[in-house]
Amino acid sequence: MAYVYDDQNIFAKILRGEIPNKTVLETDHALAFEDIDPQAPTHVLVIPKGPYVNFDHFAGSASEAEIAGFVRAVGQVAETLGIAEGSGGNGYRLLSNSGADGVQEVPHLHVHLCAGRVLGRMISKA
Ligand code: 5GP
């Protein structure tokens, strides 16, 4: 199925500067900002600047530069926030919801970086 990107989604508006955000990092290919409804002491969203609905859309359609830029930005955010174990932090959880079963609310690819407490098991079995 071909993806159709809705340029009226909230993150598209954030990228265009129409909605404010608390920016953690901005690079050529990515923007990281605090989640408006944090689920952990640290809860940051990282999004690519291009019009991609979800992870598989991005993986299949983005350029090498966009993919490298996005992935490196995620790592840079973890370093910047002091949560990367390699830099003495306590670690984090990285996740990306997609579609109905993934319960994706905003149809612009984003990864959640959550940290700051023990986050429990990955997902409930129910
Ligand atoms: P999803 O369920 O799509 O993976 O997660 C969307 C996330 O975006 C949620 O955690 C929600 O709190 C966050 N969110 C929704 N609207 C806004 C907004 O206007 N600003 C910010 N910073 N986060 C938002």
Image: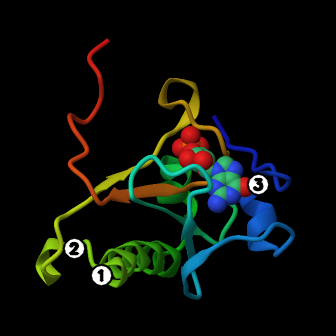
Image coloring type:
rainbow
Mark 3 is surrounded, within 10 Å at the Cα level, by few (under 14), some (14 to 19) or many (20 or more) other residues, namely some
Q: Position of residue 88 (x, y in %)?
A: 12, 79
Does residue 83 sit above or below 28 in this rendering? above
Mark 1 is surrounded, within 10 Å at the Cα level, by few (under 14), some (14 to 19) or many (20 or more) other residues, namely some
Q: Nearer the viewer, residue 101 or 114?
A: 114
Q: In this view, does 118 lie to the left or right of 6?
A: left
Q: Mark 1 near mark 2, Cβ–Cβ under 8 Å? A: yes
Can you identify the residue that label 2 sits on? 84
Quadrant of residue 89 within the rendered picture: bottom left
Separation (CA) of disc 2 from disc 3? 28 Å
Checking the image for residue 10, the label placed there is 3
Image quarter of the N terminus: top right
Q: Position of residue 102 (x, y in %)?
A: 48, 31
Separation (CA) of disc 1 from disc 3? 26 Å
Whether disc 3's CB lies below 8 Å from ligand 1 is answered yes
As shown in the figure, which amino acid type bears the numbered disc 1? Glu
Q: In this view, does 98 lie to the left or right of 7?
A: left
Tell which circle, 1 or 2, labels the residue nearer the N-terminal end: 1
